[in-house]
Image: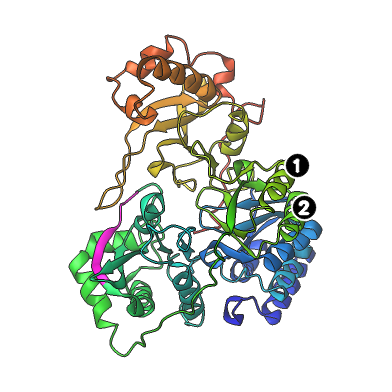
């Protein structure tokens, strides 16, 4: 990995020294926060360790990088988690080991640099760009090349707020273009490769579909365009207003034409650039999809999978946008052995990806902003045959991207006479169109412990009445009050309706300060 993307030995040593000062009581963790965030270390909710986020440009790792991640996890982490921004997060890293963890990863060519806080976050890329002929071209080299270019810019790690960039693909992977502060969608114009550029997308409490800011730019202009947009954002985003200074709010306030003109004004003098091409899998090879249930992997699974990948002759692997690993370039006779080895590790694996996926955010067992225990709900749903892809977020921030899933659950809290109640809002997503995303309406609010029984009951009714219609469409077509009527009176009653998954103690809202900004 390019050196500019890696944490320097000096920064790692500064983090280790400051961690020692925190332990000794010489400085507070709040004073330590800016330094550790620059190295990718975040405070966990329980206070029993730190989360270290690994930045993986475009979601692609070499086998050697995966093995290095697995080796460090075996010494330093309790578990790992695959994120929907193609990162890997370590949990349970002890304070005195944070600096060593970051340094060991950097020495192995794995980046944690500026992976949180007010930075350019990990730049994502479509997973199948070099595998699927419906893609105009593979955007991965652009995601990696732009990561390198911006990492050398003085604003990369000192923005007013986080800035997210994604390189998308067609079909299901195109959504990633519309969800980012800046999205690049590969396109061809009279045979010339370029990008459709979308700006101001985002989820969270105020979700917004991105705006098309450029119908087409040539591929060699992509890096300078992103650099100009980042610089413009840095000049107009008010640092003292963190609730309203993301790029989507800038576009709302100033208008698309003004923002486009300002970006164009910064393009003069910027160098065009094309990235180096990525290696292409040899003809006649096959690929595997390996799932991480609820996004989690133990150190033993990381290490075991590394050995299985090496035995199968894998050269690289990719993190998808739905907590799976895609492994291309395999010899056909190696595939069955890899699938068998993954299954033996507790990781479902197949040659073709499963459509009925369960995707879950990290949740409040580690995240300071989580309201209800999404991870525990995900585990409670295991064994249930889903009628549709389902994404679960523990709060309105929407880190599972539930708003754009065929079926989504968003954690929330209701105030009732009996106390605060952990709940989920059920939503059905709408199809992606040429103008981007449409966010599905809220259909039903359910107590956390009633989600699985409700899905089971509604799925049975759907199968009996309209199984050829997509489940989400069937839900959305029900009249007002119709879903509640199908569940029946008293469905949401009972003492356990005020309990969250993963605990039999009375529910309490426990929020900490945001670490992700």
- Asked if marks 1 and 2 touch (Cβ < 8 Å), the reply is yes
Query: Residue 362 at x, y = what percent?
Result: 58, 46
Which secondary structure class fits the magenta region best? strand
Residue at (74% x, 59% y) in the render: 70
Name the residue at 58% across, 76% down.
Answer: 5
First in sequence: mark 1 vs mark 2: 2
> Where is residue 477 drawn, in percent x and y?
28, 24
**What number is the disc on residue 461?**
none
Residue 46 position (above or below residue 382): below
Q: Describe the colour scheme in one phrase.
A: rainbow
3 relative position to 422: left or right: right
Q: Rounded to the nearest whole Å, what is the CA distance between mark 1 and mark 2?
A: 10 Å
Residue located at (35% from left, 80% from top):
220
Q: Which element carries disc 2, helix, strand or loop?
A: helix
Give how far across and how far down residue 460 sits, in percent.
Answer: 46, 16
Q: Eyeballing the image, is 165 above or below 419?
A: below
Asked whether residue 215 is drawn in magenta, I would say: yes
Q: Where on the picture, by quarter, is residue 507? A: top right
Q: Which residue is mark 2?
A: 304
- Residue placed furthest toward the bottom: 269
Q: Is residue 285 shown left or right of residue 437?
A: right
In the depicted view, which residue is nearer to us: 278 or 99?
278
- The residues colored magenta run 207-216
Against 429, is 302 above or below? below
- Magenta stretch: includes residue 47: no
Asked if residue 156 shows in the view, the reply is no
Give the x, y percent position of residue 234. Answer: 38, 74
| Residue that carries the numbered disc 1 in the rendered image | 344
SS class, disc 1: helix
Residue 124 appears left or right of 477 = right
Q: Residues within 10 Å of mark 1 (few under 14, many from 20)?
A: few
């Amino acid at each position: 990995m390019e050196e500019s993307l890696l944490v320097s030995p000096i920064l790692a040593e500064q983090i280790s020294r400051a961690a020692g000062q925190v332990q000794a009581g010489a400085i507070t963790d709040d004073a330590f926060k800016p330094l550790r965030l620059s190295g990718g270390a975040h405070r966990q909710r329980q206070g029993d360790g730190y989360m270290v986020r690994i930045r993986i440009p475009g979601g692609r790792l070499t086998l050697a990088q995966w093995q290095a991640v697995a080796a460090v996890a075996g010494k330093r982490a309790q578990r790992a988690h695959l994120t929907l921004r193609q990162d890997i997060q370590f949990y349970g890293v002890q304070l005195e080991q944070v600096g060593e963890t970051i340094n060991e990863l950097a020495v192995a060519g794995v980046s944690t640099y500026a992976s949180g806080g007010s930075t350019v976050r990990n730049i994502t890329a479509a997973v199948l760009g070099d595998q699927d002929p419906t893609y105009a071209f593979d955007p991965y080299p652009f995601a990696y090349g732009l990561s390198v270019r911006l990492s050398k810019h003085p604003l990369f790690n000192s923005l007013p707020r986080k800035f997210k960039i994604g390189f998308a693909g067609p079909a299901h992977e195109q959504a990633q273009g519309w969800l980012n502060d800046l999205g690049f969608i590969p396109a061809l114009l009279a045979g010339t490769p370029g990008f459709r550029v979308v700006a101001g997308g985002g989820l969270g409490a105020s979700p917004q579909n991105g705006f098309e800011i450029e119908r087409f730019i040539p591929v060699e202009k992509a890096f300078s365009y992103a650099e100009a947009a980042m610089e413009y954002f840095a000049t107009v985003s008010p640092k003292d207003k963190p609730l309203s200074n993301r790029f989507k709010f800038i576009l709302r306030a100033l208008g698309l034409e003004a923002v486009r003109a300002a970006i164009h004004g910064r393009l003069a003098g910027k160098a065009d650039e094309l990235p180096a091409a990525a290696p292409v899998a040899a003809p006649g090879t096959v690929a595997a999809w390996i799932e991480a249930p609820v996004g989690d992997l133990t150190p033993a699974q990381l290490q075991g999978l590394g050995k299985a990948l090496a035995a199968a002759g894998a050269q690289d692997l990719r993190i998808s946008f739905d907590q799976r690993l895609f492994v291309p370039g395999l010899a056909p006779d190696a595939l069955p052995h890899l699938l068998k080895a993954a299954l033996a590790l507790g990781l479902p694996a197949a040659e073709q990806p499963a459509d009925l996926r369960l995707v879950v955010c990290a949740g409040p067992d580690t995240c300071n902003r989580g309201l209800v225990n999404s991870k525990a709900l995900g585990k409670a749903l295991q064994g249930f045959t889903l009628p549709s892809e389902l994404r679960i977020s523990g709060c309105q921030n929407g880190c599972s991207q539930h708003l754009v899933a065929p079926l989504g659950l968003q954690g929330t809290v209701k105030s009732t006479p009996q106390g605060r109640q952990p709940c989920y809002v059920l939503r059905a997503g709408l199809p992606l169109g040429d103008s981007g995303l449409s966010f599905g309406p809220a259909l039903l609010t359910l107590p956390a412990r009633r989600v699985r029984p409700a899905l089971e009951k509604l799925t049975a009714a759907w199968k009996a009445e309209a199984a050829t219609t997509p489940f989400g469409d069937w839900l959305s077509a029900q009249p007002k009050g119709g879903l509640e009527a199908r569940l029946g009176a008293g469905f949401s009653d009972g003492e356990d309706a005020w309990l969250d998954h993963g605990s039999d103690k009375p529910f309490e809202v426990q929020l900490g300060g945001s670490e992700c900004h």
